[in-house]
Amino acid sequence: MSRSSVKIGSILMHAMGWFTLVMALLWVFITEIMFVSDFLAYTGQTYADYLAANPVFAEIYIITKRLVGFVLLGVALQILFITKYGYEKGEKWAWVALLIAGGLLWGTLIGYRAFIGYLGGSTIAFVAGAVLYALGILIPAREIWSKEPS
C-alpha cells in the first residue's frame, strides 16, 4: 500500500477539488436557483414572495450567497493547487493544509444546513464532498506521516 495509498488519496482529493469547483461555479452563476429551497426552509417564505415584498433585501441575500460562491471558488482552486504540487508527492504540509481546508469547507457547509434545519436535496452533495474529502485525507495518512522528511 506504500505508494498507491498516496496516489489513491491524491485522486480522491483531485475529485473533491473539481467537485468543489463545479459547486462554486453553480453558486456564482445560478445563485437564485441554488438557494430557493434554503430560503424557504429558513424563512418559511418563498423567495419570489420575498423578492416582491422586499426587492432590495432579497437582492442582498442573493449577493451574499454569490459571494460565498466566490469564496468556495478560491477554496477549490487552493485544494487543486495543494493536491497537485504537494499532496501527490506525499508532503506533510499538503496533508495538513488539506485537512484544514477540507475540514472547514465541508464542516461549515454541513453545519450551515443543520443550522437552518434543511437537510434535504443538496445536502447530499455536501455529504458526497465530505466523503471524498475524508477518504482522500485518511487513506494516505499513515504513509505520509510514517515516512522520514526529505
Image (spheres, rainbow, N blue to C red):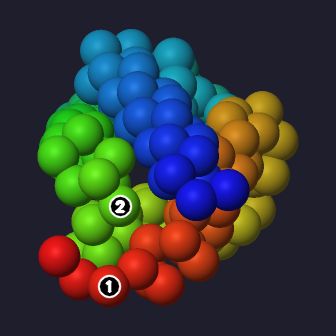
Query: Residue flagged by tag 1: what amino acid is it?
Result: Glu
- The reply to whether residue 133 is in sight is no
Q: Which residue is mark 1?
A: 148
- Residue 113 figure quarter: bottom right
The x, y position of residue 135, in whole percent, is 67, 56
When the figure is inspected, residue 44 is found, relative to residue 112, above or below; the finding is above
- The residue shown at (80%, 52%) is 119
The x, y position of residue 99, in whole percent, is 42, 72
User: Would you say 105 lies left or right of 94 here?
Assistant: right
Per the image, label 2 sits on a secondary structure element best described as: loop
The x, y position of residue 5, in whole percent, is 60, 53
Q: Nearer the viewer, residue 62 or 110?
A: 110
**Number of marks drawn:** 2
The reply to whether the C-beta atoms of the residues labelled 2 and 1 are less than 8 Å apart is no
Q: Which mark is residue 82?
A: none
The x, y position of residue 60, in whole percent, is 23, 42
Label 1: how many Cα within 10 Å (few below 14, some 14–19, many 20+): few
- The residue shown at (51%, 35%) is 11
User: Would you say 92 lies left or right of 8 here?
Assistant: left
Cα separation between marks 2 and 1: 11 Å
- The reply to whether residue 98 is in sight is yes
Q: Nearer the viewer, residue 139 or 112?
A: 139
Q: Nearer the viewer, residue 112 or 8?
A: 8
- The residue shown at (17%, 76%) is 150
Q: Which residue is mark 2?
A: 90
Which is more foreground, mark 2 or mark 1?
A: 1
Q: Nearer the viewer, residue 24 or 85?
A: 85
Query: Residue flagged by tag 2: what amino acid is it?
Result: Gly
When the figure is inspected, residue 52 is found, relative to residue 5, above or below; the finding is above
Which residue is at the far right? 120
The numbered mark, 2 or 1, whose residue comes first in the sequence reads 2
Q: Quadrant of the N terminus?
A: bottom right
